[in-house]
Image (spheres, rainbow, N blue to C red):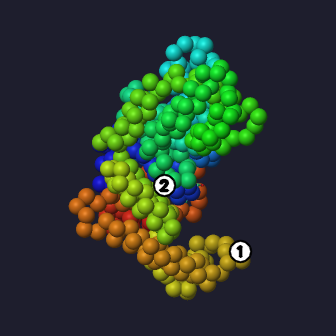
Amino acid sequence: MPLSSLIDSRRVILCVGSGGVGKTTTSAALGLAAARAGKRALCLTIDPARRLAQSLGLEELKADAQVVDPTLFRKAGLEVGGTLTVMMLNTKRTFDEIVERYASTPEARERILHNKLYHYVSTALAGTQEYMAMEKLHEVKSKGAFDLIVLDTPPTANALDFLDAPVRLIDALDSPAMRWFVQAFRSSGKLSLSLLAKSAALAIRGVGRFTGGRFLQDVAEFLTEINDLFGGFRERAREVQASLRAPDVAYVLVTSPSPMAISEALYFSDRLVDLGLKSDAFVVNRVHMPPLFRPTTPEVAEAVSRKGLRLDRASPETLMQALADEARQAELDARHLHVLDEAFAGMDRRPLRVDVKAFTDDVHDIPSLDRVARILVRPRTEDASASAQAAAL
Ligand SMILES: Nc1ncnc2c1ncn2[C@@H]1O[C@H](COP(=O)(O)OP(=O)(O)O)[C@@H](O)[C@H]1O
Ligand SMILES: [Mg+2]
């Protein structure tokens, strides 16, 4: 019972992986699988795959939740008992909502929202995107309008940064150096550069890298204002961070069969363990499957002429070559994936593992997404994989 068990028993699935391995595809497919299982599913993403979004009828990538029109599923011949909603994360808007929630007065709120530094912090500061993704996730989960939320985690240098982003960001903004900075500003009413010389350098490192004449003034103003938010803000960050550890949250590590991607996924898995969490499943995407049969050249030539296929510049020999390449690639993938098996050999509670075949085309429409969804939730038996392959030929 591969990932259907997670879909049935969890409220949140976090898809983690390095860029390009198929994280967005896996998240969307899990959302679709959940909707097919009758759930109200939400896919939260910051990095929508454009063509896929278009074929789901999401022409404009809005931050608001958009329900995929059920007639699109019907047209693709799918029975979907639940609903699939897609929400694009908007980091700045989410941050604005926090400011609105915690500012003590409307004036303070306006001053923060219009501060130049706030603009930077809420859009470009390292960690903000990850934090806001978690914030949104926490908010949506608390509202209870969805049975399952699948988060396509933001593409970051380190895919697990989001786990401690909330508290890290708060710590950067609320460090002793920052507090000192604010004090220095407050006591004189304006910024005394000589007073700040040393600690400013420290403080600035915490906030990010800037240039520009009014910079220090902006920093000081911003910090003074944002101080106003800290009580509620810090508490909220702790709450958001704690919610990632709840037992109803599943971690799905997405990887490709390449040795680099596998070792990165294993690294993420180790880091989860360091944090007292565990990976529930590995999705290995774009795996080459061994050809089910290896015909001889004359058999290929006969089939080509029987079916009246036009090969243009190809020949039965080139087809044979392609088949041999496929078989070799499948062998290579299997060898690389052995590392993954070995990493968890002998463990009582091994993470689930599902291999998704490499399709010849991109996964950019509902039927191809559904093919991935079915692989993710189908029982793992030799029969199932053989018949799926045969069907795909
Ligand atoms: N199993 C697959 N077979 C063929 N193409 C795939 C498969 N999985 C993903 N793709 C394609 O690979 C590209 C990258 O996938 P995507 O899910 O956007 O990756 P990520 O979110 O990890 O960067 C997309 O064009 C997608 O359609
Ligand atoms: Mg993506």
Residue 266 can be seen, yes or no: yes
Query: Which residue is tagged 1?
Result: 312
The amino acid beneath tag 2 is Gly
Q: Is mark 2 within 8 Å of ligand 1?
A: yes
Residue 391 in percent (x, y) is at: 45, 63
Whether residue 273 is situated above or below residue 249 in the rendered picture: below
- Quarter of the figure with the N terminus: bottom left
Q: Which of label 1 and label 2 is nearer to you? A: 2
Query: Which residue is tagged 2?
Result: 17
Given residues 220 and 113, the one toward you in this image is 220
Q: Secondary structure at mark 2?
A: loop
Q: Residue at x 62, y 73 (%)?
A: 308
The amino acid beneath tag 1 is Asp
Q: Secondary structure at mark 1?
A: loop
Q: Is residue 12 left or right of residue 330?
A: left
Given residues 115 and 143, the one toward you in this image is 115
Q: Quadrant of ligand 1?
A: bottom right
